[in-house]
Amino acid sequence: MTMLEKRTPIPVEEAVARCMAHAHKLPVITVPLADSLGYYTAEAITATYDIPMFDKSPYDGYAVRSVDTIGASGDNRISFRTVDHIGAGAVSSHAVQQNEAVRIMTGAPIPEGADAVVMLEQTVETEEGFTVRKSFKSGENIAVQGEECKAGELVLPAGTLITAGVQAVLATFSYSTVPVRRKPSVALIATGTELAAIDEPLTPGKIRNSNGPMIAGQLAELRIKAATYEVTADDYDHLLALIKEALQTHDIIITTGGVSVGDYDYMPDIYKALEADVLFNKVAMRPGSVTTVASLENQLLFGLSGNPSACYSGFELFAKPVIKKLMGATNCYSPVIEAELTEDFLKANPFTRFIRAELDVINRTVKPAGFNKSNAVVAIAKSNSMIMLPGGTRGFQAGDKVQVIITKLTDVASW
Ligand SMILES: Nc1nc2c(c(=O)[nH]1)N[C@H]1C(S)=C(S)[C@@H](COP(=O)(O)OP(=O)(O)OC[C@H]3O[C@@H](n4cnc5c(N)ncnc54)[C@H](O)[C@@H]3O)O[C@H]1N2
Ligand code: MOO
Ligand SMILES: [Mg+2]
């Protein structure tokens, strides 16, 4: 029997800080615009020209000189003669003269001489053109060059998550390819002799490997495709060999299980054998207190707990911000908001407690997502957030305000 290793718990914030201190931005690559979703911009996007690039019509109508509309009223309709007709994409060669108009469609450049646009609905057609019954101010109904942004202006800083809207901006400024930081390559290894493959019969003592697909899903939510290794029995030699193999080609190795002090928990010995620098192996939190993170030169090993809720929380708290930082994100952390508890939670909290929860963002209320022990699976599925109760506090009651980490921003039943 070996001596039980003594572990010193560190505060969650300190554990996160240690992880982040070992997360170095990955090199810049370029990806086609169409494939850029989910990356972060590696350089600032600066306007290369004014937007709009030219004064344009925001309406289907007529471009006129506003001075010619002075005095127009219901009793004094002023007539205009149509001298040209352009749609978006065309440029009129006419300089608009007194009481002339160019029929112009939305998006077309304002012709020379004109300084206002009359909407089609504001006109009555005549043989030569149309009449108006109101005067127009100079600049009325014109989308002015540079009104959205000016050439040289910073539009989006480096480290912005590329969303559909960001892709629109990138297209606007002619980025057919986008400089981004490459995504980390992540190996995923579920450990445990008890784990049965998804199609294997559940013989006595066996359970399904739910953590493997869950972590793969958490990575996929960050648009990272995990390299999922075979499910591995608690066999030191085999596990060590597999992790060594994974270290050949991956930036991050995520394991689940085998990280505590049990007889078949081999991860602590594996970190020793790898001569990895263990950043921490005990965190003052529940669940997931045994979460271990170790570093090797430029690689990180996340030893997530085997217990599903602890595993999930460990990924959200430590792996997620690290991955975002590696990809060059400016905002690496999930948003935290204050919400009102709608149920009592009477357990005391010797350590910081994370509770998979249902947050109603609109009403700013929150409640635990059902049975919430470390081994819970269903509550993870029902949650969109985690309530964070500080260590050293007693129970909380309905009506109390609590801090909540938002883990999912969409697809929530109560929204
Ligand atoms: N004497 C002590 N015992 C335990 C301690 C402790 O401090 N002293 N910590 C407990 C806590 S807290 C947790 S959490 C677990 C962590 O255990 P491990 O990370 O070593 O994980 P395992 O022992 O491999 O498994 C724990 C539990 O989770 C189930 N599991 C494992 N992998 C999966 C998977 N891929 N999918 C679904 N479920 C999985 C496994 O069957 C076990 O039931 O240790 C406590 N013990
Ligand atoms: O690490 Mo365990 O899940 O704290 O309960
Ligand atoms: Mg164990």
Image: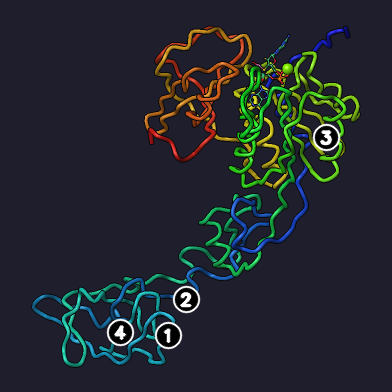
Does any atom of ligand 1 lie closer than 8 Å to the CB of label 2? no
Query: Could you tell me the amino acid type at mark 3?
Result: Ile
Position of the C terminus, as image quadrant, is top left
Marked residue nearer the N-terminal end (3 or 4): 4
Marked residue nearer the N-terminal end (3 or 1): 1
User: Residue under circle 3?
Assistant: 243
CA gap, disc 2 to disc 1? Answer: 12 Å
Asked whether the viewer can see residue 132, the reply is: yes
Q: Residue at x 75, y 40 (%)?
A: 187
- Tell me: 24 left or right of 324: right
The quadrant in which residue 272 appears is top right
Marked residue nearer the N-terminal end (4 or 2): 2
What is the number of the mark on residue 90?
A: 1
User: Residue under circle 2?
Assistant: 54
Position of the N terminus, as image quadrant, is top right
Marked residue nearer the N-terminal end (3 or 2): 2
Query: Could you tell me the amino acid type at mark 4?
Result: Arg
Does any atom of ligand 1 lie closer than 8 Å to the CB of label 1? no
Cβ–Cβ under 8 Å for marks 4 and 2: no
Circle 4: element type: strand
What is the number of the mark on residue 103?
A: 4
